[in-house]
Amino acid sequence: MGFKGDLEALILGVLRTESLHGYEISKRIKSLSGKALSYGEGQLYPALHRLETDRAITAAWIPQEGRPPRKVYSITDEGHKQLEARQKEWRVFEQGVINILYGQKEPA
Amino acid sequence: MNPIESFLEAMETELRGNVSEPAMAEILAELRDHLQDSAEELRATGSLNPEADAVAEFGQAKKVGQELAAERNRARYSTAEKAALSLAALAAVTPMALDLLVDLSSWLTGSDFRIFLIWYLVALWCLALFVASIRCRRLLSRQIAGIVLASGFVGLVVGGFSRGAQPGPWGTQTRGTALQRMKGLLSERDGIGRIQVVQDKLQAGVTAFATGNLGVFRQDGGYIVPKMDGMRTQIWQDDPRGWRYRYEAIDFGSTASLSEAKRLWAERGPEMIKLTQDGIRGNIGEAAELRKVVWSSWGETIRREFPIRGGFTLFGLIVLVGANLLGTGIGAMSRRWRRRGTA
């Protein structure tokens, strides 16, 4: 596929409803996008760290039954704000691409 | 070795030294979880080599490691790093303030305690770099500290030369220093004289090496180093060991260009010598050993009056690099010891 998504926005979108660990986030992005959006999984972690530094998400080590604790990410209020802003940006972008690809007329 | 463990080992190599030990341990644990989950799923879907496939899907350890390290380094500075960088900035700014202080005090007292301040600055720089090297776990921080320190250092050296080459109150300070030196020579000629010869040679050697004398030509028994504008008058002593520099009269310093200075010398040389001799008599009285008056450039005067600056450049750079390397080495060793302690 020629178009690439905004990985950070996708992470925020996936975390919008529940807290997830890194591998699960990666799986969700693939499955929810119908495998249209697939990244080298390694790209996920720098993006997670970036969002964490920007306080859009938080991370906590959650104990697992019969397994070592696991790092789980949750979206913050700041993250929700960022997601909202990116959703708006996406709408504008999406409309722009549609206009060009489908030849819609320019708004008067 | 298991491909996942090999991958994690490669990742550790990328991260070590760029992120703290606890952060690195967390990152590796998280990536291990991810890779193991991925391998399990691949195994369930019939992969023959799930660990290797999981690693392949993940990406290159080097690239991911570098990105992760860059992200971690983008995070806020620790208190220790802030302290180290502040110290570095202080060390860089201090020369300007202290140099002004020295000028003022020398102007007022005529004494030359510049050398003590230079040693103080060397010590301060070394301390700052040493602390920065140990405490700044990020290479970038160390480099910033190094650049800040080097800037301050260069500022002192360049500022010293350029400032000395200007007319004004600094000329008075130069006279105070030279006069003080001359008085010492006159009163304790034998004792200090021998030391002075060795010191002169050492200073001349270091200065020549550090600053590079581009051209020297003799003129009426003296010489001019055509490096900077303006003229100074030197007094030389006829000594059993040979001609020796004794005193630099500054009464006729000017800001004439070298060509202008040459023209003045050609037209009014003898007259200027006489004026200078009169001026010196007015300053320090008659002295039998003061026989020769020659013209020289400002640059030469400054190098003679403050030769330590030239040597200091070289010496300081060696010390700065040494302190950085030593600090980095000790920092690395202490991290290794801590790792062993926690292993």
Image (spheres, helix red, strand yellow):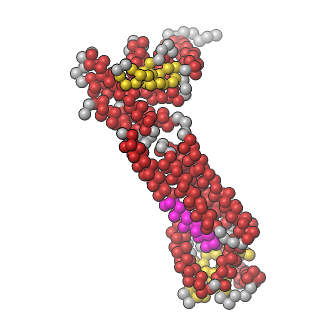
Expressed as whole percent of the image width and height from the top left, the position of residue B83 reads 58, 46
Left or right position of B186 against B323: right
- A46 or B226: nearer the eye? A46
- Estimate the x, y position of residue B196 in percent, counting from the top left: 58, 80
Q: Is any part of residue B145 visible from this angle? A: yes
Residue B115 colored in magenta in the image: no
Q: Residue at x 56, y 90 (%)?
A: B240
B131 to B167, vertically: above or below: above
Say left or right for B313 vs B32.
right
Q: Residue at x 66, y 77 (%)?
A: B181
Residue at x 64% of width, y 60% of height: B159
Residue ranking furthest to the right: B282
Residue A43 versus residue B310 in the image, above or below: above
Q: Which residues are magenta?
A: B298-319
Q: Position of residue B44 (x, y in %)?
A: 27, 16
**Quadrant in which the C terminus of chain A is drawn:** top right
Figure quadrant of residue A93: top right
For the point 37% across and 19% down, the residue is A65
Q: Looking at the image, how many numbered discs can be counted on the residues?
A: 0
Answer above or below: position of B196 versus B151: below
Image quarter of residue B309: bottom right
Quadrant occupied by the N terminus of chain A: top left
- Residue A6 seen anywhere in this rendered image of the structure: no
User: B18 or B205: nearer the eye?
Assistant: B18
Q: Quadrant of residue B274?
A: bottom right
Q: Indicate the position of residue B143 as horizontal and vertical percent values.
A: 51, 47
Answer left or right for B167 relative to B221: right
Q: Main SS of the magenta segment?
A: helix
